[in-house]
Each structure stands twice: as structure tokens, then as C-alpha cells.
Image: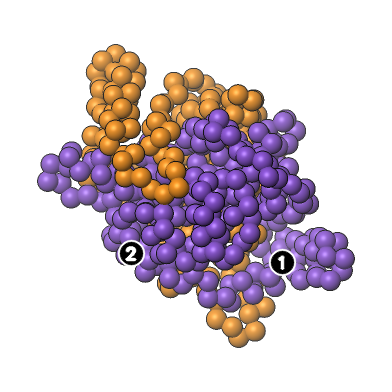
Chain colours: A purple, B orange
Amino acid sequence: MNEVISLIKNHRSIRKFKNEPVTEQQLNEIISAAQCASTSSNVQAYSVIAATDPALKKQLAELAGNQAYIEECPVFLIWCADLHRLDQVTAGHMAGRESYVDSTENFIVATVDAALAAQTAAVAAESLGLGIVYIGGIRNRIAELSELLNLPELVYPVFGMCLGVPDQEPGIRPRLPVEAVLHRNGYNEERIQEPVQAYDQTMQRYLSERTGGKRDTPWSQIMADRLAEPIRLHMREFLSGKGFMKK
Amino acid sequence: MNEVISLIKNHRSIRKFKNEPVTEQQLNEIISAAQCASTSSNVQAYSVIAATDPALKKQLAELAGNQAYIEECPVFLIWCADLHRLDQVTAGHMAGRESYVDSTENFIVATVDAALAAQTAAVAAESLGLGIVYIGGIRNRIAELSELLNLPELVYPVFGMCLGVPDQEPGIRPRLPVEAVLHRNGYNEERIQEPVQAYDQTMQRYLSERTGGKRDTPWSQIMADRLAEPIRLHMREFLSGKGFMKK
């Protein structure tokens, strides 16, 4: 295993940070690395907002479900799918042509672009000894959060990311067996039940060890409980209101 | 700049591959590294199909717009957002509860999960001396391609990825200035026009150098031409037909 793969395999989400800054130089290095990720037809349809203002971080933490580490980390990044920049800079070149900026296709392109850049930033940050955690909670009260950050039409916050110097070393959470996610020459339904049963047992042991025997819920049960929760059912309407997926 | 960031900044898409295999060991190392990427609440809502069968790759190349490198690369990966596995393994645990697997929220979660894993695979592959290119063209004839790969309900192919030993060393394409994508404590509309004008000039020089003066279209003009194209307008209906974004 080379050093890059070793770094990648050592990833764990960090939710406790030292009271130390992320320097401007580090931030610039991380974001300029992120920009080198692939992007569909070079559209670069994403933006990232670095929240460093303490009052703002406090508000964002509250909107994202009172996760203290959002307030405590020195830099909280909000990764946005951004079709607004494209819409603005192409306006003078359309020559009366219709724009398909608001297609479902372009929604996917922008969402994927944001994710590819963010994950590249995550690896770059970890290579600098920093820690990160993705925050899906910024979609909890997405309309208020978007207003707070002045997000225009055709921009939506996909996820947040806490960034800082780690002050904890949590265990690495086991993943599904590779044969569950890697199919050969076509989707194979038979790769579902058996690998997941094995993973249920792995996760039961892992949880039990981490909680001193207090919890040992199988993964598929945890997933069922999650799917049964009506989480963020406002997303479709919110995105439509922001001008996405009109076509 | 450390070695990881140096590797990331050295990324360029590879579209010409040597007639050399990607070994099983390399593929397993790449996919197991990809699995270490963050995933929303550990849902791991993605699958990846490795197409190595020559006849299948030929068909996939045709469906993706006759891109020869899909046929020529030793391994063509199809990265899928996969809510089907979750749906299947949670069925026995729902105890009569409604499942929100088909929400727009979960569509985004699965799409992002696939992208985070894929980008981690891309970095891992490049660290092994391999080259990659993302292929959005697999969404061109997405229904036929999904049938060819036996993709069930609640699975869709987000993008493809050619993988192989590089047989070219293309230039690194310049990106937008960092100040265009990195905002501070809120979205700043003023970061759009000026950085993009500077980038238009950068890209004109870059294109002109690469084509011996034959092309020097500004980026914003290229983007306008792209947005004016009715690309993949079938996506919304296709996704709905696959069971996504019902809520």
C-alpha cells in the first residue's frame, strides 16, 4: 500500500478540534487542490463558502441541528452546487438561444462537481494533518441557511465540512465488504443479501466494542430506522424554488 | 506542497491507454480505498460496476457516444447511485413503516456518495500510476445502458470512468482563479465577472497554444454554447421511472 492509499484508508470523521487556526495558506492550498478535481466539460459548477466569522458559525451550527463542532472548528466550509455563475457569465453570449441551465442533467452535473471538488479537498486537508467531517445537517433548514449566506438562484448548499486540527482519534468505521459494492460486467442481485448479512455482524461487533456492549444494532436495522424517518422532505420544493430541475 | 497535493494537482484526464491490464489487486486496492470515503450516515448508497468484457465495453462505448477509449481501456467503471441495496436489506425491518427511500433528499445522498467514492478511487488510481477520465456520456442513452447492465429500480449510472495505464501526457487544463470559487462568510456576487474575465483570457491563451492558434474561444462563450444545447433532457423522466425523487 502506498502513502496516498494509506492516507485515504486512514480516514475517519473528526468532530473535535484543537483551538488552533487553519492558516490562509493551508486553506488556499486545499481549495486550489480541490479545483484540480475532474469537472464535467470544465463547467466548474460549484462554489465553496469558508465561514470563519464566529457569529456566523454559531448561527450555522444552530441551523444544522446544534452540532457544536460547526461552531468550534476554525473553518466551516459550505460546498455549493453553483449554476448561477455559469448563468451570469453566459448571458451575454446566448444570442437569443434558450438556456438549459435549469435541466435535471445540469443539476446532477453541478451536484457531482461540488462533491468531486469537496472530496479532493478532504484528501488534501488530511494530507496536511487536518481533520474533516461532512455535514449533511446544513440541508435541515436549507432555506434559512441559504438566505443567511446570500445564496442566489441556481445555487444550493450540498453539504458542509468542518475543517481543523484534530483533537481526537476515533476508530475507523468498517465498510461493506468490497464484493457488495463492486459488481462485474453487470449488476448482480446476488451480491446484496450475503455480504450485508456479514456486514451486519461486523457492525454489531464494532458497535458493541465501542459502546462497552450497550449497542449492537445490525446495520440493516439502523438503515431501516433511517429510511423510515421523513428527513428533509422539503428538498424537492426548495430546489424547484431555486430554479433547479425545471426541465 | 506535499506529495499528495502534488499528485492531486498533477491530474489530467487520460484518453489513451497502453495495452496493459489493470490487475485484480490494483482494482481491489482502488475500490477498497474508495470505500473509505465519507458517506452520509454510513448509508454507502452506491455501487460500481467494473466492465472488463470486450464485447460489453464495445457496446458501452457505442451507447456513450462512440468514445473509443471506453472500448480501449482495460477496465471501464460505471459508478452508480444505489438505493436499491438499502431498499432490499431494510425491507424485513420496516415493521409496516413507510420508507422514504424515494425522497429527493435520498437521491442527493446517493448521488453524492457515488461521487465521493469515485473521486477517492481516482486519486488512489493515480497514486498507482494509472490514469482515468470521467465519462458523462453514459447518461446519453441511459435507459438502454441501464438495461444492458441489469440495473434494478433505484439504481442509476451517474458517470463512467476509464481506468488504465496512460499512453499520453496531456497538459493540465487551467482552472478558474481560486477567488472565483472560494467565497468568504457568504456568497459574493462580485466574485463572478472579474475572475471569469481573467479566466476567459487564460483559456484563450491555453487553447491557442494547444491548437497552434486554430482555436481561442473564451471559456464563457464555450459555456454558453454548452448551455444552449438540449443535453440529456430525458434525465428527469428516466429517474422518475427508476423510482427516484417521488417525494
Residue plotted at (31% across, 41% down): B190
In this figure, which residue is indicated by the disc labeled 2? Answer: A240
Query: Is residue B106 positioned above or below B30 on the image?
Result: below
Q: Which quarter shows the C terminus of chain A?
A: bottom left
Query: Is residue B23 positioned above or below B83 on the image?
Result: above
Q: Position of residue B152 (x, y in %)?
A: 52, 63
- Few, some or many residues within 10 Å of mark 1 (<14, 14–19, 20+): many
In this figure, which residue is indicated by the disc labeled 1? Answer: A219
The residue under label 2 is which amino acid type?
Ser
Comes first in the chain, label 2 or label 1: 1
Give B167 or B34, whichever is nearer the viewer.
B34
The chain letter for the residue carrying disc 1 is A
Q: Position of residue A232 (x, y in %)?
A: 49, 69
Give A22 or B43, whichever is nearer the viewer.
A22
**How many labels were placed on the picture?**
2
Q: In this orientation, does residue A161 appear?
A: yes
The residue under label 1 is which amino acid type?
Trp
Find numbered disc 2 in the image and state the secondary structure of the residue it sits on.
Answer: helix
Q: Position of residue A22 (x, y in %)?
A: 60, 38
